[in-house]
Image (cartoon, coloured by chain):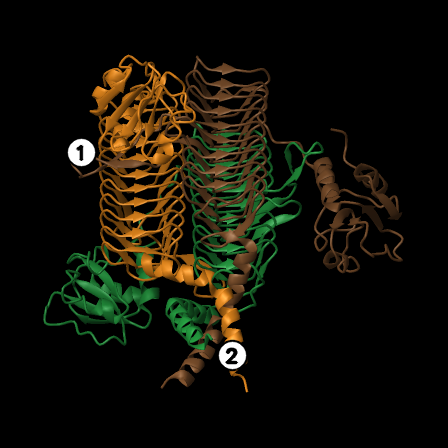
Chain colours: A green, B brown, C orange
Amino acid sequence: MSRPPATAAELATLVGGTLEGCATAPVRGMNGIDQAGPHEATFITSDQYASRWAASKAGVAVITEKLPLEVGADATRALIRVKNADLALATALEAFAPPPEWPAEGVHASAVIDPSAKLGKGVRIGPLVVVGRNAQIGDGCVLQPGAQVCADTVLGAGCVIHSNAVIRERCRLGNKVTVNACAVIGSEGFGYRPAADGRSLVRIPHLGSVLLEDGVEIGANACVDRAKFGVTVIGAHSKIDNLCQIAHNCQIGRMSVIAGLTGLAGSVQIGDGVQIGGNTGIADHRRVGSGARLAAKSGVMEDVPAGATWGGFPAQDILAELRVVAAIRKLPEWSRKLRRLLSEKAP
Amino acid sequence: MSRPPATAAELATLVGGTLEGCATAPVRGMNGIDQAGPHEATFITSDQYASRWAASKAGVAVITEKLPLEVGADATRALIRVKNADLALATALEAFAPPPEWPAEGVHASAVIDPSAKLGKGVRIGPLVVVGRNAQIGDGCVLQPGAQVCADTVLGAGCVIHSNAVIRERCRLGNKVTVNACAVIGSEGFGYRPAADGRSLVRIPHLGSVLLEDGVEIGANACVDRAKFGVTVIGAHSKIDNLCQIAHNCQIGRMSVIAGLTGLAGSVQIGDGVQIGGNTGIADHRRVGSGARLAAKSGVMEDVPAGATWGGFPAQDILAELRVVAAIRKLPEWSRKLRRLLSEKAP
Amino acid sequence: MSRPPATAAELATLVGGTLEGCATAPVRGMNGIDQAGPHEATFITSDQYASRWAASKAGVAVITEKLPLEVGADATRALIRVKNADLALATALEAFAPPPEWPAEGVHASAVIDPSAKLGKGVRIGPLVVVGRNAQIGDGCVLQPGAQVCADTVLGAGCVIHSNAVIRERCRLGNKVTVNACAVIGSEGFGYRPAADGRSLVRIPHLGSVLLEDGVEIGANACVDRAKFGVTVIGAHSKIDNLCQIAHNCQIGRMSVIAGLTGLAGSVQIGDGVQIGGNTGIADHRRVGSGARLAAKSGVMEDVPAGATWGGFPAQDILAELRVVAAIRKLPEWSRKLRRLLSEKAP
């Protein structure tokens, strides 16, 4: 990666925008419009942000081109007009991102690597990492301190396993998979049967495993349980946020995004490109079709059609749900009116 | 454990079922009806699954005996009829389960064991485990890599503490307790009081401890807090799923099952054999009677009688709740009707 | 700290209360009214507890002075009357609290400390701790076993980082900050953009960091994500319970308290002295004013005014919400009445 942009002109070139104002305005980093200093760039994506430009100390702003803001009289400031300020923001953040903090190439002396494990080229295995029997670590993988890859688990190339995360036995990760700190992949699923004497519960063995396909990211303190049999699958490029629970035998498609504190019960099926808001729950065996969207805090009890947007609990089409919410808000008033009507009708 | 069944006939014997079709059909493992190959057995517990048998590649199926399915013309397949296919599934899974991945007997060289700790016979203490001052580890316990058992904590026989789980000081575990990866047992309860000067909050000390009785299982990334005084208790054979929060001074009975992302506030009392759906919350000091069931996403604000089934938020009897949910769905329509009525009545 | 009180008289002095009954009744600890033995003190803060005093085995009770309980005829028991039994309880718990279990002063031989890290005076760094490049650990900090403080992160004086917690790179902690076991501070925020080819999602870099101000406490298995740019801030003396998710760029004020399993989406702003019940969710960019209170399981979609008490989903003023809940409970009945009315009106 080349050096980040240092001036408004260089930033304009990076994001493919049109410069107005001071081409040499210095850019040493990026910040929010209220926090940015004179040597920082900020981003203006709405009228709300545009109205704060005059009071902002930011020297430079990348702005959605249709917004009616002028750079103003200050000869030291600059605006950079772009079609899509969100995309420009991502591009700029990538340019300014500090290099990742990775362990040195090789294996730290304190790591405990089973002699039968296979390590790829250029791996970076940090302090106190544990790699189990017959595990395979692909080329260029990074295992941060305290990470564990258990027996018979296979990691593709370029995976990053963060501190104290645990990938249990017989799991499989594709290429460029990220597992954040303290996440647990491959715990046994949650299923019990009464013991023969009825005096205890016996865990049903979960013989299956977990597959995280290429580009999957798993949040900190999230859990993905292994399948009863077969495989719990998170499809390529899907992203699971912190503190989510993905139960045994779930099947998640490609490029789906699940926000924090969401729980999927056993054998849930999620299509491709699904977006799920935080703190949602989905009952076991339910299916959510590709392209569907679920509002935060939804509770899904029925299958969700592809492309639909649902919300509420029990979840339904979001427009029906919004009508219900609006009607509920008026309930106390309606109750009064109905009571009056009924008393008029009473004999 | 003896070797797993290798043919349909052996599997029929194992699960106590009646064989129809090819007795020598090979069985090398189990899988779902849509995933199983010709050398795998599957399970058919409903008409829905039965309808997929014809298209399935599975060589063998264990089937609930009353279902009207025939093995069909294919001389290479077999059906095994049983009274209870769920129980048969558990039995078969146990037979096919691979041996657990445990550290070698003894203490790994990288583990840090306080000299005052007492280790039972046959313990398996993995790499980078920490055992604190005066801790006691019962016979046959397994401490996976990175697990921690802190000072004065006592584990019974046959416990399994998974990777990076933390059992804090002065806790007590019975026999055959399982604590999954990254779970935290015995953190201080969440309670504060304003400082004398009103400018900060001071944590109220939690002097108590946690008791996990025999056969308890705690999910990955779950938390059980220590009591303010006395003991937070999880009763024998109760099972707590991933990412649950059990606050200080909760008392949970025997054989209760609590699904993922559920939170119990302080001093909640749960009876025996209670079943709690995922993402449920229970307010502090509330009691849930033995045998009660709570639907997923319930919010319990009042005591729940023994044997009752409740749901919703605030939770109530599930039948009342379902009537309310049905009525809510019709609200926009009722609002329109009522508005019409009222306009007719208007002077 | 001096030795804890050993008699009813000493306990009365400690909590500033008025003694009735046996001044020499022994006090070796504290317990709940139903669990306390004759050598333990308990606390009576309501009529409900007062009614259990006769049957309790406790030798001593600290009691809110206005409650009409008498010590009774038993010459071995004592009551201690105080204005505020909750505050007295906190004082007594502090007196009886066992000393914390800390690693020895210095650095354990198994810890992995980068040579460039700076360690303050009197630090206690336990086994298997990892301290990264250029990290700074303030005077008197305690790092429990397996804790990690990553590169360029700075801890003030007197912080306690519990077992297996992870403070990622470039974060800043004030003085006397506590991070409980397996919590993760400074994971990257959850934000993605479609890749140029539309076939994957690219994580938006999060260049920012996390600031936990003086006296902040973070619960076990909780997550605080780093900012996209700028800083995710938890203000002084605020307390975050177990299993909470604080997303990128959130700004939380001073002395706010957030109960377990609550999730704040990106850029949420919380004022000072806010109290948030468990399992609450707050949508991105929403603001909650100082002194506001949110009932458990709230779902906040709009800004909450300072000092307000809100609840429900979507959250609203708690009184309006309670009226709605009461009306909802009567819905099935109203539906029947309205149906009757309409049938009478039908032509």
Spatial CA span between label 1 and label 2: 63 Å
Q: Which label belongs to residue B36?
A: none
Which one is closest to the eye, mark 1 or mark 2?
2
Q: Give the letter of the chain under mark 1.
A: B
User: Residue C80 appears at what percent x and percent y?
Assistant: 26, 23
- Image quadrant for the N terminus of chain C? top left
Q: Nearer the viewer, residue B73 or C254?
A: C254
Q: In the image as oriented, which residue stretches furthest toward the front? A: A347
* Amino acid tagged 1: Ala
In the depicted structure, whether residue B250 falls above or below residue A226: above
Query: Disc 1 designates what residue?
Result: B196
- Tag 1, which secondary structure? loop
Q: At 63% from the left edge and 35% from the top edge, which residue is drawn?
A: A201
Category of crowding for the residue at label 1, using alpha-carbon neighbours closer than 10 angstroms: few (below 14), some (14–19), many (at least 20):
few
Q: Give the letter of the chain under mark 2.
A: C
In the depicted structure, whether residue C46 falls above or below residue C309: above
Q: Quadrant of residue A80?
A: bottom left
- Image quadrant for the C terminus of chain C? bottom right
User: Residue B96 appears at what percent x and percent y?
Assistant: 72, 37
Q: Quadrant of residue A30?
A: bottom left
Q: Nearer the viewer, residue A5 or C63?
A: C63
* Amino acid tagged 2: Leu
- Tag 2, which secondary structure? helix
User: Residue A16 appears at what percent x and percent y?
Assistant: 30, 69
Q: Nearer the viewer, residue A272 or B21?
A: B21
Q: Nearer the viewer, residue A188 or A171?
A: A188
Query: Disc 2 designates what residue?
Result: C342
